[in-house]
Amino acid sequence: MGEVAQKISNVDKQELIKILQCAFAEEWLAFYQYWVGAKIAEGIERPKIVEEFEEHANEELKHAGWIAERIIQLGDKPLLDPDEWKKQAKCKYEIPLNEDTKVLVEQNLIAERCAIKRYQQLCEFCDNKDFETFRISRKILKEEIEHEQEMEDFKADFKYY
């Protein structure tokens, strides 16, 4: 982080990096869960769900990039070893062993709800203390809330089949 940026940030930098590393790991796991789910999905509404999962996978990957850039700006490196992702993540993503779209949607809904809590935590932690991390977290939070709604909509639509 630049000299002035470090001076004006009023947050425990090590704690922030710890939370960001966790979020970074969770975004990679979310990316993979959506990506692989789109590949194996079978069942009701498959074409629509595959399209939505692919869109969400791209957004989760974008989130991981934003978080990685912020970690670097704060003077650290994002987790470099993928083996660390599952260890560091607090939001646990389910291995999609069942390719039924209903099961995949439910797994992603659970993951999105955890992600919402993560970015709410980051927003609260950084509010009026670290405006750049707050801005990034708020932007991601907005998209995670949209993802949750889309999964809830699919789940509601399943009732009609």
Image (cartoon, grey):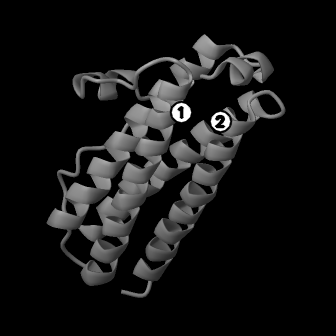
Position of residue 111 measured from the top left corner of the image (x, y, whole percent):
44, 47
As drawn, the label of residue 52 is none
- Quadrant where the image shows the N terminus: top right
Residue beneath label 2, please? 133
- Quadrant where the image shows the C terminus: bottom left
Q: Tell me: residue 15, above or below residue 92.
A: above
Q: Tell me: residue 2, above or below residue 44.
A: above
Q: Is residue 44 visible?
A: no
Position of residue 70 measured from the top left corner of the image (x, y, whole percent):
53, 33
What's the amino acid at mark 1? Arg
- The image quarter containing residue 154 is bottom left
- The image quarter containing residue 58 is bottom left
Residue ID at (20%, 56%): 36
Residue beneath label 1, please? 70
1 lies left or right of 34: right
- The image quarter containing residue 142 is bottom right
Q: Outermost residue, right direction?
A: 128
What's the amino acid at mark 2? Thr
Label 1: state its secondary structure: helix
21 lies left or right of 149: left
Residue ID at (71%, 24%): 5
Residue ID at (56%, 67%): 149
In the image, 12 versus 99, the foreground residue is 12
95 lies left or right of 144: left
Q: Are marks 2 and 1 in contact (CB under 8 Å)?
A: yes
The tag earlier along the polypeptide, 2 or 1, is 1
Position of residue 141 measured from the top left corner of the image (x, y, whole percent):
62, 51
Q: CA distance from mark 2 to mark 1?
A: 7 Å
Counting other residues with Cα less than 10 Å from the Cα at mark 2, is it few (<14), some (14-19), or many (20 or more)? many
